[in-house]
Amino acid sequence: MNNRLIFASLLACSAIFARAEKLVIKGSDTLGAKLVPMLAEEYKARAPGTTFEIAAEGSTTGISAIIDSTAQIGMSSRRARPTEASAALAKGVTMKPTIVAFDGIGVIVNAGNPLGTLTKRQVEQIFSGDITDWSQVGGAAGRISIYTRNTSSGTYSDFKELAMKKRDYAGSSQKMAGNEQIAAEVAKNPNGIGYVGLAYLRDPGIKTVSIDGSLPTEESVLTKKYPYARPTFYYTNGEPVGVAARFLEFTLSDDGQLLVRKVGFVPIRPLN
Amino acid sequence: MFKFTTRLFALVVFLGGASFALAQDSGPLIDLLIKKGVINDQEAEELRAELTKDFASTSAGKLNLNNSLTELRIAGDVRIRYESRTGELPTGDHQERDRFRYRFRTGLTGKMLNNWSWGFRFETSTGSRSSNVTMGDDAGPFAKNSDTVNIGQIWAKWEPTPEFSLTLGRMPNPLVSTLMVWDADINPEGIAEKFTRRSGKSEFSLTAAQFLYSAASTQNAFGAASATNPLKDLLLLAWQGGYKHYLEGTATFFQINPTLYTYVRNSTQNPAAFRGNFSASNSALVNNLTVIDVPVEYNWLINGVPARLFGDFAINLDGKDRATKFGRPDLDGENKAWQVGFQYGRATNTGEWDSRLYYMSTGAFALDPNLVDSDLWDSRTNMKGLVFNANYRLGAATQLSLTLAHGSRANDTLIAPGAGDIGSNNLLNKYGIMQLDLVISY
């Protein structure tokens, strides 16, 4: 009788425990501001009892969280650096990246700016400070205000690598916490320029400029015709297990990828 | 999957001919494999992660260098020397100084984006004209009192165009010169600007330097100015023109670098620098020095072996005043220094050697005794004599060198002023030095 009671109690506890599964996700603002919370809500609707702790403070924090084992999934819009891989190795952590969506980094200007296109060279010169006035690139005269992400952002380093030949940003550039802040500042400032992920290109008051004639679209990103396209990742410690594995599986499923598209990212494969 | 990744990894390494240190360069190859449909994006990411992990386990993978850095260079040398100096006074009194010495120099230079660069070098010894440490010259057996390392160079450079550079800090001497005027160990502090232009077979250059020769701890200090409480910083200014003309290839050329040196604020307003009573006991002073120096050389090949004829002539335009302040206005002709010599060979590659022989004479009032070479004439002026130097390249990074010099006082009615390593007696009549060096450079 006593044994039966103990067994029943254990079952009840494990059921409660299972329902209270918690998934800690940290990292990229690009992924963590919109896409992952939406995926989490949808996942919770399918797996009631799952709780999420999502902190979107930049890709660096996501990769660090995997290295320090303070999150099960690290969101990142950039690849792990060798020094991060080295730190992970030292702690016995295997950094495993899984592409969950593609993104294009769109260059945005104020909606009132008459300029519609820039070359890759001009983008490099503007963001590195070689060009300081819109008149130097065929626009109306006005001192260019540059808005970038902060240094913990994967987009910050990705844009340097993709668009600036790894040069430093202009000293006058203003660093913003997230994509939304950049879009908001550019919308307010007629001389503003910045960059945001695909999901933020529809924000009011801004417009996207084409780069060498190419705009960031699902097609141009998937075919890699758009020059500032990149994959985005979930990083895990080796093969994910438990709730992390199930959430990753959901993210990669057709339903998950439809959400990816809905938010404004590019799915990892063509969808119907 | 693992086997597939492993195969691809082997392919990348094979195709790239890459070591792990080059794994980061495999990006374009991976992109090509995706484009060709050999692998998909996810497989490519796993491959990249594998390569990054392997690269991370190497020494290079653990370095975290600033993105603005485009080049980082580590360089230096170790020199082990046996040296023998001899000196003789007019009385026949004789002194020898035999020493085993070492020199260690190591530094980093970095090139940055936007045409900036920087460098620093650690050197043994605290002396301005020497990086040598004498072995056994300590407070006790094998003590380390003299085995100190100091910052020998630390500089920042901006080169906005290939033709112009601005250097600030404690820098390698930017001026073309000879040991007659500048000891090679001196790294002057201040600012230097250089402009060079090549036109056909001719190369022109202009170099200006503003060196902080001696800084006042405060300017216009409270109370009366004195040697220990000077009013202003003392500056050494230099203007150098350069002309190099290539006659055939790069081995046959002529070069001349006329230079003007002046000292600013070495006047009565700056007692620390102005030592009007230039005397036997106060010999290394810089009053009344306005020096024109003209180093010149001609390089050519003799049966394919590099040869070089070189010379240097310097004159102190204020030599008469300097002689007068010393108390010998009749010796105003001692305001000239010169050298002429010949070099054969060039020790660049393993097994190669070179040698040079030259004569050097330095008038007592010709040059700044604080700058002249500390070895050849023992940091002194009013000396003349013959110098022989030969180098043999033992290997790619190792060299043997021999230097022999023998000099005597140029004018017996004057002292031979200077700091002096063989002893501070300015009546030195004869001087000799032999140095045998083993140098390892990296």
Image (cartoon, coloured by chain):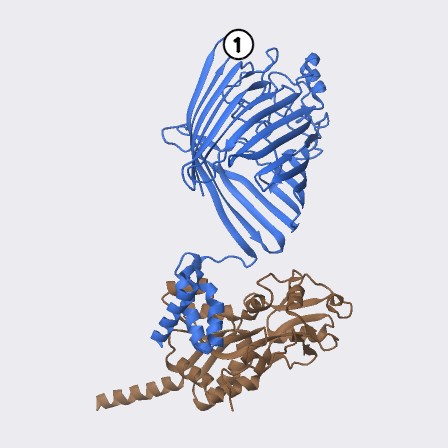
Chain colours: A brown, B blue
Q: Which residue is mark 1?
A: B90
Q: Is residue A193 left or right of residue A224?
A: right
Q: Which of the 4 image quarters holds residue A235?
A: bottom left
**Residue B15 visible in this rendered orientation of the protein:** yes
Depicted B85 relative to depicted B49: above or below: above
Q: Position of residue B199 (x, y in %)?
A: 68, 45
Q: Which of the 4 image quarters holds residue B398?
A: top left
Q: Position of residue B296 (x, y in %)?
A: 63, 31
Q: Position of residue A53 (x, y in %)?
A: 47, 78
Which residue sits furthest front? B303
- Mark 1: which amino acid? Pro
Q: Position of residue B52 (x, y in %)?
A: 43, 66
Tell me the residue at 58%/34% (across/down).
B299
Tell me the residue at 49%/28% (across/down).
B389
Tell me the element at label 1. loop
Depicted A198 relative to depicted B200: above or below: below
A194 or A124, which is in the foreground? A124
B254 or B328, which is in the foreground? B254
**Residue A96 visible in this rendered orientation of the protein:** no
- Give the total number of marks visible in the rendering: 1
B240 or B351, which is in the foreground? B351
Q: Which of the 4 image quarters holds residue A49?
A: bottom left
